[in-house]
Image (cartoon, rainbow, N blue to C red):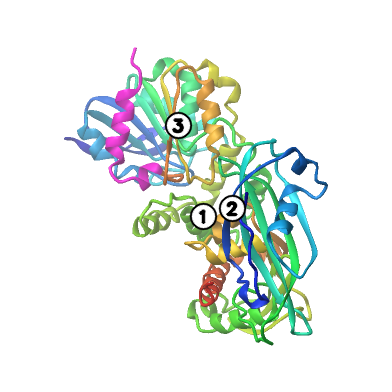
Amino acid sequence: MVTTVRTGWFEDCAVGERRDLGGYPVTENDLASPFGLAADLLRAVVAVDGWLGGSWTQVRPPRPGEPLRAELTTIRRRRSAGGDTGVVTWHLALRDAGGAVCQEGTASGRLAARGAGPDPVGRDVGTVAWGRALAERLGRRPAFAEALASWDGAVGLRAGEDEVQLRIYRGRVLEAVARTPRGATFTLGADELTWVRLLTAEDNEFMRTAMTGGFTVRGAGYEYLRLTSVLHLVIDVARELALEEAP
Amino acid sequence: MSHTARYLELDGAEVFVELAGEGTPVLCLHTAGQSGVQWRGVTAGLAARGHHVVVPDLPGHGRSEPAPGGPVTDLGEYAAWCLRLLDRLELARPYVVGCSIGGKIALDLACRASDRLAGVVALAADAWTGDRPPERGLRRELADVAAPSRTDRTYLGTLAVLGRSVPAARAELIATMHRREDPAVSTSDLIGWTTHDLRERLPDVRCPVHLVVGADDLWLDVPAVRWAAERIPGARCTVLNGIGHYPMEEIDGFDERLAGWLAELPTG
């Protein structure tokens, strides 16, 4: 049976934290669940004060008796407006013997906070606080200013439903906001798990992710292509920022 | 050991060919948009192992003049060109070794002219890419060959398809050299890569074939390469762990590895 996860306080959950929950033998009952085994398992093994929602995807149906391995990743964390609680999102992947994902699911749960914050922002992709921290670091990279010396626009960076836009003029980020007056020139988006992988992988996986369809790009495709090396640098800097908060 | 280079005229255009050693001929074909320089770490060692190594720059690539009809979008044209080159150089029963489009051209040669070949080693090639990358996008890119950040995308795209075992300095050298492309030619090559379908012709191959694919090659699916090998009578398939799309550039001592594979191909 898989390990149960002690979540503790909101502050104890770190985005990017990965746990191998061990093997899980699939039963006939599991296959009958309308919510999917990955979602059921996630809610069964993670202890929270209340579940808020989630989703699951079936890549292929598991077979009864098939030994699957469960891998849990913390992919998002936000303090609630009141400050005394927060919402954490986990991703659970069920992998077969060959390592291929069979089912995966995400779920968000509420946890009580130990303190009142403030919280580190280095892994809160898509938030304004993260965008500002990123912009501040990009401002210290001459290569960023050089590459964008003739550029005027806004780059959106989106994780799941969260998007921050960097308004850029001649190599400088003028502001990082939820919405620029004219909107983003283009937005580079991916799900939270893809961002976690980008931020925590051994190397900068920007190009591999782009080439294997891991991003959704909205807006001006031409400008997105034009900024290829800039986006590679942005991911480099985002990885440095995330590393400062390694769990 | 002799090691020379020469220009010769073929189809009304000057072709650059590097020739080294004596023995069984081995025709080495480069990848999309690149040139015979990709084989520079292999040529001398392979020649020293008793092969007559022939490394052409395909039309429009490296030091060869452009193809008279403009950039080539049909790998079958390159295959037919290779047969004319073999005639011109009077090479009898050569091995053909190619990588990526070169590997697929080698497979095409096995399909169309098995009786003329001693065997084929196809690196990083399958029989059909399933329109990956999509032809439509490549044709759009061809309409604007100054497409934004082309060299950055070639550089970073090369790094992305190299194997994880390749040391950083070597990866940097490979990617930097890959920037030396003519985008009109390499995009046309890729149209050839994505549209060339050899699936139906594989069972007709009569010469020995060895398909080699890197496990880290983002451009290819290992099962698709295995599928192709299963359909070619007697073909072998090797998966290289930690290697990506350019084995002859990524692997130190590739000449020895290749000479071994050639020696292991069935004869007769």
- Decide whether residue B244 is among the magenta residues: no
Q: Which segment is the magenta one?
A: B247-268
Residue at image x 34%, y 19%? B93
Q: CA distance from mark 1 to mark 2?
A: 8 Å
- Decide whether residue B264 is among the magenta residues: yes
The residue indicated by pointer 2 is A211
Locate the C terminus of chain A and report the quarter of the image it occupies: bottom right
> Could one spot residue B133 in this view of the protein?
no
Q: Are discs 3 and 1 both within one chain?
A: yes
A111 or B172, which lies in front?
A111
Chain assignment, label 2: A
Q: Are marks 2 and 3 in contact (CB under 8 Å)?
A: no
Quarter holding residue A221: bottom right
Q: Bin the neighbour count of mark 3 within 10 Å (Cα to Cα): few under 14, some 14-19, many 20 and up.
A: few
Mark 3 lies on a secondary structure that is: loop
The residue indicated by pointer 3 is B11
Q: Amino acid at mark 3?
A: Asp
The residue indicated by pointer 1 is B157
Mark 1 lies on a secondary structure that is: helix
Q: CA distance from mark 2 to mark 3?
A: 37 Å
Q: Are marks 1 and 2 in contact (CB under 8 Å)?
A: yes
**Majority SS type along the magenta span:** helix
Mark 2 lies on a secondary structure that is: helix
Circle 2 or circle 3, nearest the eye: 2
